[in-house]
Image (cartoon, rainbow, N blue to C red):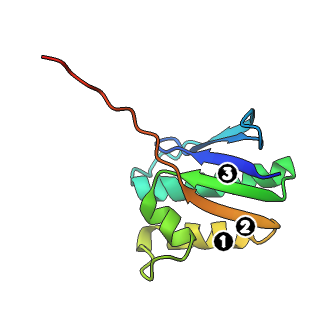
Amino acid sequence: MPFVITVGRLMCCSSSKDNSGQPCGWSCKRYQAITDALTLEGLACREAILLATAKGFDKIILEGDCQVLINTLNKCIAFLPMEIQDTVKDVLVLSIQFTKVSFSLFVERVTLLLMI
């Protein structure tokens, strides 16, 4: 059964749900000096991997809304942005312990319609 993790940014937060979509954990970590969104997304992915490890899951799907990071983790881009090189390496090394890992792009946007 896969463990689905949705990654958010700003405070480096991740939430998890089981294969039926029910919440089963969360993690939130604040970094004082980091304001770069890509870096925070990478750190949130690392925290999500650590959360899955702590929960004892062996199959995970990591969902995020940062296309650059997800493509980097899936090795779909040759250029690795310098600001996340170490974090991406951490995520990839930590993900080796799982029997199945998937990094997928999940974009949930709210469209606001204004009627004038």
Asked whether disc 1 touches disc 2, contact meaning CB atoms under 8 Å apart, the reply is yes
Q: Secondary structure at mark 1?
A: helix
Q: Could you tell me which residue is drawn at 76 percent across and 49 percent down?
A: 3
Taking the image as shown, residue 57 lies to the left or right of residue 92, namely: right
Q: Which residue is mark 1?
A: 92
Q: Which mark is residue 48?
A: 3
The three-letter amino acid code for the residue at tag 1 is Leu
Residues tagged 3 and 2 counted as in contact (Cβ below 8 A):
no
Towards the viewer: 83 or 108: 108
Judged left or right of residue 54, residue 13 is left
Rendered position, 103 above or below 33:
below
Q: Whole-Å distance between the Cαs marked 3 and 2?
A: 10 Å
Residue 10 versus residue 50 in the image, above or below = above
**Mark 3–mark 1 distance (CA, rounded to whole Å):** 12 Å
Quadrant into which the C terminus falls: top left
Q: Position of residue 59 (x, y in %)?
A: 79, 58
Residue 107 screen position, x and y as percent: 46, 46
Q: Secondary structure at mark 3?
A: helix
Q: Is residue 52 left or right of residue 6?
A: right
Mark 1 or mark 3, which is nearer the start of the sequence? 3
Q: Which residue is mark 2?
A: 95
Residue appearing at x 84%, y 47% in the figure: 55
